[in-house]
Image (cartoon, helix red, strand yellow):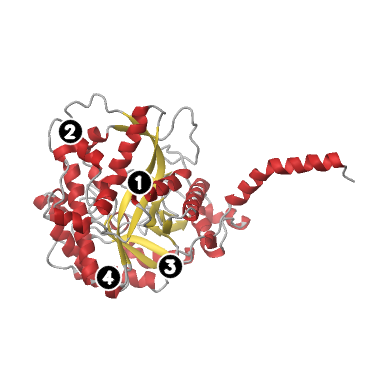
């Protein structure tokens, strides 16, 4: 029989262990913990997935792999039926993909390519008949090269009418089945790709490009709302690359640099969408190099979204590097910060990606809360969240599972705190040609053998975990799945 002293000691021990026990209980979460209208999915993009770059009337885009015209990428152009079945077998609620502008309008405008329309109609048929909701992006960085050659692409305001024409074809051709449209993927990243002009020149294409993208976005949203939204019943929004920013040190310079980074990263897109103009910080620093919206453009821009899509992969520490920029004029010199993924007094925690980028799961929740505090409560989708692995990483990708679980849990905490997040998409559904890393970087839930002509797909352990979560309402897999002999390593591509 337990004496009073022993009982008291046991009670104290339980009280001490209670926080850990509660924490352990919170580690697991279930599909039903999310709102009933929440969708879980995965994504690809046309230029990274389809291949068939010179087939059935498609013309080159600016993002086609250099010297790879005719390359098959993941051969989605021919294997979309197989992939649609895999999506259904996995249990996806939704599939996020993009439409190749140069496959629909080979000359950027004018004559519509019927083969291109036929292909996307077939893709939509395959996924919708399986109850999978399409989330479609109109431009995933892959501008038709003909428009780049003709007038500089996004650097010219001429792009506005051409993008609007392309969007009109898509709305009229596919809008009866697509109820979630995104005008563009990561305009802020697209602009930052043009840091090349850093120097003494007062001209930089970065600001002009993003400016024209925002104007184009707003005009396409106005077109959709005026002509299509009422009878098609869809929503339309914009996507932004994002990561949580925190000071590298407690110095006032790093604290100010962190706020500056948020203005340049988030405010660059969000301020025009909410307030009709860029952040005052950007105006003060970039001065006349930052274009101005006309009064009518500002009015069209304000509120030109039903949702915001966020691509989120990690957090970063921000340090100030504003000294010594002198007469250099470009985005990099204007933002004047250095982004780091770790600091000495805070050891980085895994899982680590191929680029040695650590995971900071709480950053996603912090970023959402910052956006809500700064811009108000709006509808969000997490459009991309994924783990970059080495080509030789194998199929038993437990690090990817840990990564996905951590960020899904962080997203759930944000929802519980009041965030209106209504969708989450793993990047990517299958291995793709990655803009950074090519075929040597793997994000897919499904492995693709790029050395084989038929590009076979093989599920990784993460695909089976995601399926278990979606279909069995659990994050804990059967031991039989974890010991699956199909997960033995395959020979990987040397490309």
Residue 229, numbered label: 4
Disc 4 is placed on an element classified as helix
Asked if residue 79 is positioned above or below residue 410 in the image, the reply reads: below
Q: Which mark is residue 242?
A: 1
Provide the residue designation for mark 2: 329
Disc marking residue 115: none
Residue 318: % across, % down: 36, 33
Query: Relative to residue 117, is residue 343 depicted above or below?
Result: above
Disc 3 element: helix
- The mark nearer the N terminus, 2 or 3, is 3
How far apart marks 1 and 4 lie (CA) works out to: 28 Å
Circle 1 SS class: strand
Picture quarter with the C terminus: top left
Residue 434 versus residue 128: which sits nearer the camera? 128
Residue 381 visible (yes or no): yes
Choose the circle earlier in sequence order: 1 or 2. 1
What is the C-alpha distance between the residues marked 2 and 3? Answer: 51 Å
Label 1, residues with CA under 10 Å away: few <14, some 14-19, many ≥20: many
Q: CA distance from mark 3 to mark 4?
A: 30 Å
Q: Report the mark closest to the observer, 2 or 3.
A: 2
Mark 3 highlights which residue? Answer: 85
Give the Cα distance between marks 1 and 2. 24 Å
Along the viewing direction, whichever of 391 and 171 lies nearer the viewer: 171
Question: Left or right: 368 with respect to 153?
Answer: right
């Amino acid at each position: 029989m337990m004496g009073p002293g022993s009982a008291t000691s046991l009670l104290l021990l339980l009280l001490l262990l209670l926080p850990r026990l509660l924490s352990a209980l919170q580690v697991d979460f279930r599909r039903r913990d999310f709102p009933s209208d929440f969708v879980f999915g995965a994504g690809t993009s046309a230029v990274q997935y389809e291949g068939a770059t010179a087939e059935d009337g498609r013309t080159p885009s600016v993002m086609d792999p250099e010297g790879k015209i005719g390359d098959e990428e993941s051969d989605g152009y021919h294997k979309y039926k197989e992939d649609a079945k895999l999506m259904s077998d996995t249990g996806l609620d939704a599939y996020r993909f993009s439409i190749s502008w140069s496959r629909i309008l080979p000359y950027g405008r004018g004559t519509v390519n019927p083969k291109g329309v036929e292909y996307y109609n077939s893709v939509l048929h395959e996924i919708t008949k399986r109850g999978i909701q399409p989330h479609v992006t109109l431009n995933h960085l892959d501008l038709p090269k003909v428009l780049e050659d003709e007038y500089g692409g996004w650097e010219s305001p001429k792009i506005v009418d051409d993008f609007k024409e392309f969007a009109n074809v898509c709305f009229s051709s596919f809008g009866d089945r697509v109820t979630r449209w995104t005008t563009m993927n990561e305009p802020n990243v697209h602009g930052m790709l043009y840091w090349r002009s850093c120097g003494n020149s007062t001209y930089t294409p970065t600001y002009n490009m993003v400016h024209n993208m925002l104007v184009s976005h707003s005009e396409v949203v106005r077109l959709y709302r005026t002509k299509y939204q009422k009878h098609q019943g869809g929503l339309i929004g914009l996507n932004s690359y994002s990561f949580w920013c925190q000071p590298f040190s407690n110095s006032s310079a790093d604290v100010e640099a962190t706020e500056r980074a948020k203005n340049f990263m988030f405010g660059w897109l969000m301020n025009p969408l909410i307030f009709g103009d860029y952040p005052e910080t950007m105006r003060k620093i970039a001065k006349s190099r930052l274009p101005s919206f006309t009064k009518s453009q500002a009015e069209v821009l304000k509120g030109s979204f039903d949702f915001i899509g966020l691509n989120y992969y990690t957090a970063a520490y921000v340090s100030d590097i504003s000294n010594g920029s002198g007469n250099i004029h470009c985005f990099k010199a204007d933002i004047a910060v250095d982004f780091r993924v770790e600091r000495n007094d805070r050891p980085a925690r895994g899982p680590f990606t191929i680029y040695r980028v650590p995971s900071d799961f709480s950053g996603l929740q912090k970023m959402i809360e910052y956006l809500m505090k700064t811009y108000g409560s709006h509808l969000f989708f997490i459009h991309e969240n994924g783990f970059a692995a080495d080509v030789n990483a194998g199929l038993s990708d437990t690090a990817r599972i840990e990564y996905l679980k951590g960020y899904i849990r962080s997203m759930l905490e944000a929802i519980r705190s009041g965030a209106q997040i209504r969708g989450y998409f793993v990047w990517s559904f299958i291995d793709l040609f990655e803009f950074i890393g090519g075929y040597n970087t793997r994000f897919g839930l499904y492995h693709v053998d790029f050395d084989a002509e038929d590009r076979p797909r093989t599920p990784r352990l993460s695909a089976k975990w995601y399926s278990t979560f979606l279909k069995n309402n659990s994050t804990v897999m059967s031991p039989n799945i974890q010991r699956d002999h199909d997960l033995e390593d395959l020979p990987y591509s040397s490309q």
